[in-house]
Image: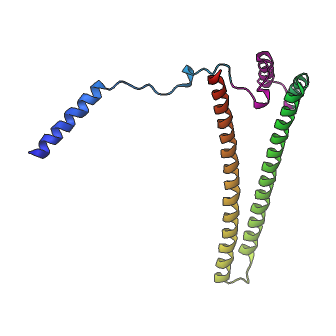
Amino acid sequence: MAVFDSAVLLIALSAAFARCSTPVEPFNLRYVKLEPPPKPPFLANATHETIKQFMAIFHLSGIPQMRKVNELDVMIGTLRPEVQLSYQRYKADALLLKLSQDERLQEITEKTHFTMVHLEALKNSKSTEIKERKRRLEAIFSKYSDFMIQAVTIEVADVVDNIMQNVLRALLFTERMTQK
């Protein structure tokens, strides 16, 4: 009887809670407005008009990438030396990041090619007995999988690091805006 009473009580409480609870709206970015809008870090102290002009050039579609970068360079060249220096640092960071990614991708390509050549040579080898072939296959795949895990880990770590830097930048920006 006590089990039945507790079950009835549980059902009654859950029904009452379902009726009394207020509906929660899902998070929607349409209702969020950042004022002033976020801007690139090197434009932290720039005027609203400068930021607007920079972002307009940045968001232009239909023009070649090099021309867009040249236009941005010219525009930044008219600003204060601190902003120019910050912009140059930003470009240097982006360039070095891209070069390191390209280097890693080249290394992955070379290692994959090396592995495929070894597998093909092992497949075409008539003199290698089955146990030796199996041992070599395991060694090749072990080295290749270790390398790929390390390469993917580095890529993911770089992405997470970049995301966390941007989140921190946004938090600091928000904190400054709320303190004003």
| Residue at left offset 64%, top offset 77% | 134
Q: Pick out the residue farthest to the left.
A: 1
Determine the image quadrant of residue 119: bottom right
> In the rendered picture of this protein, how many numbered marks are placed on residues?
0
Location of residue 33 with respect to 167 vertically, above or below? above
Q: Position of residue 77 (x, y in %)?
A: 91, 25
Determine the image quadrant of residue 123: bottom right
Q: Is residue 154 visible?
A: yes
Left or right: residue 131 compared with residue 73: left
Determine the image quadrant of residue 44: top right
Q: Position of residue 130 (x, y in %)?
A: 64, 82
Image quadrant where one finds the N terminus? top left
Q: Pick out the residue farthest to the top.
A: 49
Left or right: residue 45 compared with residue 168: right
Location of residue 106 with respect to 78 vertically, above or below? below
- What are the residue bounds of the magenta stretch? 38-65
Q: Position of residue 101 (x, y in %)?
A: 78, 49
Q: Magenta stretch: residue 98 in it?
A: no
Q: Is residue 69 visible?
A: no
Image quadrant where one finds the C terminus? top right
Location of residue 130 with respect to 153 vertically, above or below? below
Q: Position of residue 18 (x, y in %)?
A: 29, 29
| Residue at left offset 74%, top offset 61% | 112
Tell me how the rendering is colored.
rainbow
Location of residue 30 with respect to 136 vertically, above or below? above
Left or right: residue 39 compared with residue 175: right
